[in-house]
Image (cartoon, rainbow, N blue to C red):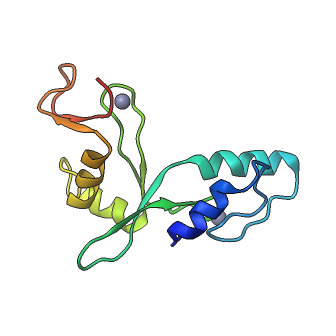
Amino acid sequence: MITRRAHARRTGASRRLPSNCPSCGWQADSAEDKKLLQDELLTEWWALGQVEPATMTTEQKYCGQCRPSTVYLVACGICRDGPLLAGELAAVAIASEPDLPVVVAEALTDRGWRQLADVRGKGPGWVCCR
Ligand SMILES: [Zn+2]
Ligand SMILES: [Zn+2]
């Protein structure tokens, strides 16, 4: 898990391309790989922190090498944007469909997402935009 301090230090650093995955340590050697890794690290992943009581980390990073096999996309009903749930959290989300796990719903609400009874005639869903 990435601590807040480590995160602040990284965002305060220069903007050169990353060469290592912070999660698995995979090393990008070529400029192409570095560009690819940068894109992968921009993806917003949410993962289960602690199981009981459930906590969640929203700063998890993965590269193409260590990306979890179970993934669940939380998509806004309008713009289709949204975080990816990783591993165990994705499995919980799949099991609790059509509802989202409480920790996820709370984090979405904190970020200004709204749960609507009907999104553009397609039934209930979450939206991040108006
Ligand atoms: Zn990795
Ligand atoms: Zn949206």
Residue 41 shown left or right of residue 94 in the figure: right
Give the quadrant of ligand 2: top left
- Out of 79 and 69, give the one closest to the viewer: 79
11 vs 54: above or below:
above
Above-or-below relation of 53 to 125: below
Q: Is residue 64 visible?
A: no
Give the camera-side residue of 45 and 129: 129
Between residue 16 and residue 95, name the one nearer to us.
Answer: 16
Residue ranking furthest to the bottom: 52
- When the figure is inspected, residue 11 is found, relative to residue 88, above or below; the finding is above
Res 127 quadrant in image: top left
Choose between 72 and 55: the one closer to the eye. 55
Please tell me which residue is depicted at 76% across the width and 45% down the height of the picture: 35
On-image quarter of the C terminus: top left
Tell me where residue 114 sits by quadrant. top left
Image-based side of 76 in relation to 17, left or right:
left
Q: Position of residue 13 (x, y in %)?
A: 72, 56
Q: Locate residue 3, reporting x and y percent.
A: 52, 71
Identified at 36% across, 59% down, the residue is: 90
Residue drawn at (25%, 60%), measured in percent from left and top?
A: 103
Q: Position of residue 99 (x, y in %)?
A: 18, 50
Side of 21 where 17 appears, left or right: right
108 vs 60, left or right, is left
Q: Is residue 112 above or below residue 15?
A: above
Residue at screen point 61% across, 69% down: 23
Q: Is residue 33 visible?
A: yes
Name of the residue lying farthest toward the right: 30
Residue 51 on image: x %, y %: 29, 77
Instruction: Give the farthest residue toward the top.
Output: 120
